[in-house]
Amino acid sequence: MGVSLAPLIAAALLSSPPTVVTGAPCDELGSRELVTSFISAFNRGDVRRLDSLFAHGMWWRWYSVSTGPGKRIQKAAYNRQTLIKYFRARHKHHERLQLRSFQFNGHSLGFVNFEYQLLRRADDMKAPVPRAYVGKGAVSCWAGKIAVWSMGEES
């Protein structure tokens, strides 16, 4: 019998996201908590915690910063293997992030999407005052971790 499994696999992948053992990162509260945990670990320079908060393998997408200092775009943004090195470099410049707002944007194909506004400051920024940044991100419901983080200076 030549039965195709493709329809069953497609249905499973497009179905509701699974419940993750590590909590509820795929609801509004859980995804916000994941973002605040990231910002807290980033500000402390806790690279072990940072590494644990971001997806690996097939669930990883990108981490980008469109404006310098610490610009991370194109090929570099998609490279998960250099992410922790990037965080270490930014911590050496005493970079700090402060969340100003968080907006949950719902589910899409196994990911939770969100937008945020934050303040960003670091020793290597031209102005000594924090700058306003806006961004978007996504949590992989399969991994229960951040899969996308993308931010740029607010214009």
Image (tube, rainbow, N blue to C red):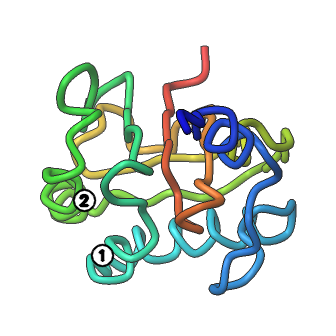
Q: Quadrant of residue 71?
A: top left
Q: Position of residue 134 (x, y in %)?
A: 62, 32
Quarter of the image where one finds residue 29: bottom right
Task: State the residue position of label 1.
Answer: 45
- Residue 44: x and y, percent? 38, 79
Q: Is residue 62 left or right of residue 108?
A: left
Left or right: 81 with respect to 48?
A: left
Give the mark nearest the N terminus, 2 or 1. Answer: 1
Q: Residue at x 20, y 57 (%)?
A: 93
Q: On the picture, is 123 further left or further right than 10? A: left
The mark total stands at: 2
At horizontal 32% and vertical 81% (from top left) the residue drawn is 46
Give SS at disc 2.
helix
Q: Amino acid at mark 1?
A: Gly
- Mark 2, Cα crowd under 10 Å, few <14 / some 14-19 / many 20+, is some
Identity of the residue furthest to the top in this view? 155
Residue 59 shows in this picture? yes
Dot 2 corresponds to which residue? Answer: 87
Q: Is residue 114 visible?
A: no
For image coordinates 41% across by 39% down, the residue present is 61
Quarter of the image where the N terminus is located: top right
Few, some or many residues within 10 Å of mark 1 (<14, 14–19, 20+) = many
Which mark, residue 59?
none
The reply to whether the C-beta atoms of the residues labelled 2 and 1 are less than 8 Å apart is: yes
Gap in angstroms between the C-alphas marked 2 and 1? 7 Å
Residue found 59% across the figure and 36% down from its top: 3
The vertical placement of 138 against 46, above or below, is above
- Name the spot of residue 88 as percent of width and height, x first: 17, 64
Nearer-the-camera pick, 65 or 148: 148
Look at label 2 and name its amino acid.
Phe
User: Considering the numbered disc 1 on the image, is that residue within a helix, a strand or a loop?
Assistant: loop
